[in-house]
Image: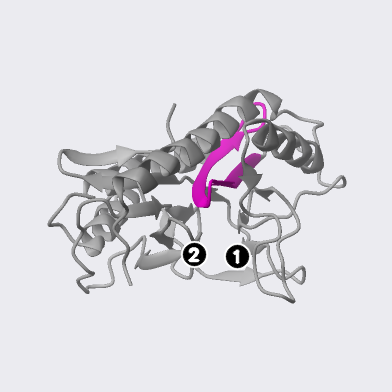
Amino acid sequence: MIIQKSENGLKIMREANRIIAIILSEIEAKIKPGVSTYELDKWAEDRILSLHALPGFKGYGSKTKKFPSTLCTSINYEVVHGIPSKQRILKEGDIIGIDVGSIYKGYYGDGARTYAVGKIDDRKAKLMDVCKKSLFEGIKAAKIGNRVSDISNAIDKAVRKHGFEIVRDLTGHGIGKDLHEDPQILNYNNGKKGPKLKKNMTLAIEPMITDGGYDVETLDDGWTVITTDRSDSAHFEHTIVVRENGPEILTRL
């Protein structure tokens, strides 16, 4: 069931997602060669708590499979859900996707960005740029009366003209009191029409693209999703609300 949020619910979600924007903005200065993903995770958890919220991902999952960290830290060919570790040290030329969630007064915030570690090559820079631009093309399509598939098709068109591939097994989603709500938002055109977009629907739009094929697999840790061909991957995400005058980005300062 797709949930249209109340104005009070949106007020709380704006703060939950403002917190995400703060984390994703402030963490950029901390991403440099020699830093461990554990250090980034520890900082992010402390910062979220200082903003009177709770980490949205830590402990998320089933009774037998709970995510152990505040951040998802995914390096190079890791697409999403990478687990922070003291042994994962960032190197010059890496790219790292940071995905972070918050819980504030019962509502979730969710957002992601991919960052360069030091100086990266031109191909990685283009991959990141195309992914980021495709996110904003998808957001522009999130208008009342459009369909979810219009978001998917806009992302697809923005990515494919540059020759990159789109991960198909992972999607965007609705968000609110639950981290993952309806509707599912594909990042590619599957030729089908999705449900219509209505006022006050809140969506986490998140293209994940690769410099190779679209096939992915999950590592033995049960979480980290990687490209099967080990090609680099980029991930950008904003949480938005569909409004009468167009989409409002909540994960923005």
Q: Residue at x 68, y 65 (%)?
A: 223
Q: Can you say whether 178 is above or below 120 in the image?
A: below
Measured as percent of width and height from the top left, residue 184 is found at 37, 67
Residue 9 x, y percent position in the rendering: 38, 48
Q: Is residue 113 magenta?
A: yes
Residue beneath disc 1: 229
The region drawn magenta spans: 95-120
Taking the view exactly as shown, the residue that stands out farthest to the right is 87
Seen in the image, is 223 located left or right of residue 145?
A: right
Front in this rendered view, residue 147 or 180: 180
Looking at the image, the residue that sits furthest to the top is: 29
Residue at screen point 65% across, 36% down: 48
Residue at position x 38%, y 39% in the image: 11
10 Å crowding of disc 2: few (<14), some (14-19), many (20+)? some
The quarter of the image holding the C terminus is top left
Q: Position of residue 101 (x, y in %)?
A: 57, 48
Q: Is residue 134 visible?
A: no
Residue type at the position of mark 2:
Gly
- Is disc 1 surrounded by few (<14), some (14 to 19) or many (20+) residues within 10 Å? some
What amino acid type is highlighted by mark number 1? Answer: Asp
Cα distance in 3D space between marks 1 and 2: 7 Å
Prevalent SS, magenta region: strand
Q: Which residue is mark 2?
A: 213
Element carrying mark 2: loop
Q: Nearer the viewer, residue 209 or 235?
A: 235
| Residue at figure coordinates x 52%, y 40% from the top left | 113
Does 98 appear in magenta?
A: yes
Question: Dots 1 and 2: beta carbons under 8 Å?
Answer: yes
Answer above or below: position of 162 versus 60: above
Under tag 1, what secondary structure?
loop
